[in-house]
Image: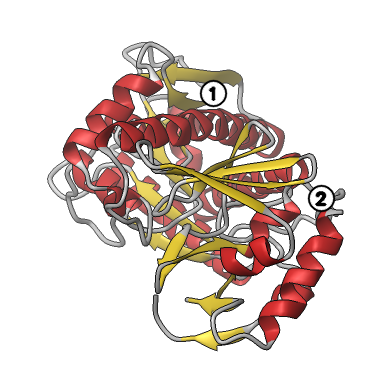
Amino acid sequence: MLTTSLAMAMALVAAAPAGNFRVNGKDYVGTAALTACGWRMSVDERAGVYTLVNGEHRYSLVPGFDVAQVDGRPVILDGTVLFRDGEMMVPAGLFALSGGARSVPSDGSIPLRKVILDPGHGGQDSGALGPGRVREKDVTLSVALRLKALLEAQGVEVAMTRANDTYIPLLDRSEKANKSGADVFLSIHCNAAPNDDASGAETFALTWSITDVTRAQKAAARLSPEDVVDGASHRVSRGAEQAIFSAYLSEQRRQSLDLARAVQGEMIRQLGETDRGVKVKNLSVLRETYVPAAMAEVGFISYAETESKMRSAAWRQKIAEALAAGLGRYARGEVQRVGHIAGSAPVPASARGRQVAGR
């Protein structure tokens, strides 16, 4: 029923002046076309939540956000719910989330649209220093630039918090990530310990001791919706804004843990390092970043054997390849789990409409 109704909606809006649109390269469906085909729409004006119902499927959305509930489960959409000339415009990829199974790439591809990389430290902050005077900031930047090249070769857009030997404050790194429109944020570091025998790789996600409600309240107090979500509107109450932030951050936390597990798994598999596991910690770049975020500690620079390898361009390249594989493993898992990755959901051919410039 869902596929038939959507096809009917697409056929209807194809000839209408306000129907299916492409906005900034993404497909949208107008709610007028859906209701004309029998969909029911209701709105909780106090909370600013719109609900679409078609048969057994129920979609709850808030204009200005790219998080929704589909049949009771939170999902991240491939675009922001918009208003155009008084009509709500829904990302077309939403309707595939409750449809049939998706094919999952198994060829090592990386189904991500955009990644933001964060080479740790920089400028006056050298980070950890190895016994042979290798500096953490140099290793992390070298690995990040190599990883950037690998991702771009796969068609992934890459942003970086720093691309040279520059000091970037921690909050500025998170702010750049939050405004980047990226699917994931990966911070790259080298570990160090007073015990010069410590070795291995580990990956961090945000600690559970900081609740999603606490983060949502802080986000809502410090940021406007459009600071976090592209195209967000001011048409929701403060309470609804905090509720959506909380739902969004709950899903982001799950994604961050999955990202950390995938990155850790590939580092151990490809680098042969001792597995120190996935850990959770209250780190600024994880706490203040609102896209799926993880921090990879690629090895102990304080361990002479590891530092020696880190001097090598070949080893830095190998680290970059492991991180790229981890990102791909995470992204393919997301495609398998919910049928899409934020910003790169496959869009049915029937949903492609005429191009509309701008928002």
317 sits to left or right of 269 = left
Q: CA distance from mark 2 to mark 1?
A: 42 Å
Q: Is residue 203 above or below residue 158?
A: above
Where's the N terminus, which quadrant? bottom right
Q: Is residue 12 left or right of residue 206?
A: right
Is residue 321 positioned above or below 135 on the image?
below
Which mark's residue is nearer the viewer, 2 or 1?
A: 2
Quarter residue 214 falls in: top left
Figure check: 136 above or below 101: above
Q: Residue furthest left?
A: 124
> Quarter of the image holding residue 37?
bottom right
Q: In the rendering, at what x and y percent does residue 48 appear?
A: 39, 43
Q: Which residue is mark 1?
A: 200
x, y percentage for residue 160?
A: 36, 58
The residue at the point 39 percent across, 62 percent down is 159
Question: Is residue 240 in view?
Answer: yes
Q: Nearer the viewer, residue 285 or 201?
A: 285
Q: Which residue is at 17% across, 49% downward?
A: 167
- Residue 99: which disc? 2
